[in-house]
Amino acid sequence: MSDLKAQIIEQLNLQEITPESIGNDQTLFSKDGLGLDSIDALELIVLLQQHYNIRIANPEEGPKIFHSVRSMAEYITANQTAKA
Amino acid sequence: MNSESAYITGSCIIRRNQVYLNGSLLWEAGQELELPEFLRAGYDRFSGQYPKFHKMDALSKLGWLAAEILLKDTRVASLQPEQVGMVLSNRSSSLDTDLRYYATVKDFASPALFVYTLPNIVMGEISIRHGFKGENTFFVSDAFDTALMSSYPAQLLAVTPLQACICGWVEVMEQQYEAALFLVENKSDGMAEPLTAAALSSLYQTNK
């Protein structure tokens, strides 16, 4: 998950945040979490496509997938396994 | 048109990696710094604690930084959100970012760049930072039009709820950049110059 955190930081240009400072279960889009916004959500979709060749077929899954780093990692693992 | 009741109460000019506040050199960064590095150094020097800065394009960063410096220790923070507006201008619109965005389109179009493909976004970033909700307008012209930038803000101060207006020039194209922001108000602090094209031109040309 530390690699994924580093990718998120690079993709979203979170220059004042380190991978170590992001909790695995910290919410990504709430104000008391990482505080990401709607443009960040689009960038996370691009990240999945660029780094993992994963396209989100159902946009309604977005809030669940992007709840936290752990939920993103689980989605990536499940979809990469499914493709393998 | 010039106004008898509009005054220039502050100025911030950023060019050649130098920052001038009210005509005096406030800070100078190394000339070897390219624009992104200079803007980051300026952010660290004058602000910090605003992570969204890093997501902005160069035009927004430059305007945001100039506003940050210009507005420090002014009465603007005490005004109502609807009483502060902006009239900015530049030569290249958002072309610098437009080209960067276009370069991403053939691979993965960047949402983060796309949102900065309008020149007026810089005014949005400044407004978000300071909570301004007053009227704002962005003009594109070959050069800093001091006649327009004196008459239009003066008109806004005269006929709208605005009591203060940030006006000026924010230009970025590749490594060429310049910001000249002026705070104009309908009240004089005693030292302020009346808002005229000649006064704006004189301030703009200082140290150029």
Image (cartoon, rainbow, N blue to C red):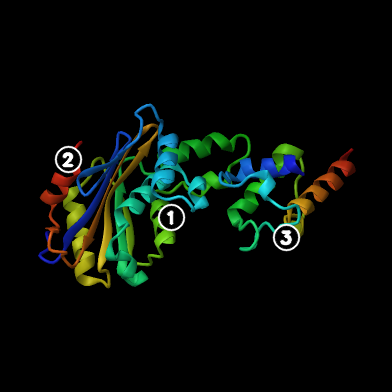
Q: Chain of mark 3?
A: A
The correct choice, above or below, for B40 with respect to B156 in the image is above
Q: Chain of mark 1?
A: B
Q: In what element is the residue under mark 3? A: helix
The residue nearer to you, when weighing A66 against B72, is B72
Left or right, A34 with reference to B176:
right
Please state, as top left, top right, bottom left or bottom right, where the C terminus of chain B lies in the image: top left
At label 1, which amino acid type do we have?
Glu
Q: How many numbered marks have been drawn onto this rendered protein structure?
A: 3
What residue does disc 1 label? B125
For the residues labelled 1 and 3, the Cα–Cα distance comes to: 26 Å
- Mark seen at residue A7: none
Give coordinates of residue A35: x percent, y percent.
Answer: 61, 58
Q: Say which residue appears at 38% left-offset and 55% top-offset.
A: B123
Left or right, B126 with reference to B107:
left
At label 3, which amino acid type do we have?
Pro
At label 2, which amino acid type do we have?
Gln
Left or right, B56 with reference to B75:
right
For the residues labelled 3 and 2, the Cα–Cα distance comes to: 52 Å
The correct choice, above or below, for B27 with respect to B7 in the image is above
Please state, as top left, top right, bottom left or bottom right, where the N terminus of chain B lies in the image: bottom left
What residue does disc 2 label? B205
Q: Chain of mark 2?
A: B
What residue does disc 3 label? A63
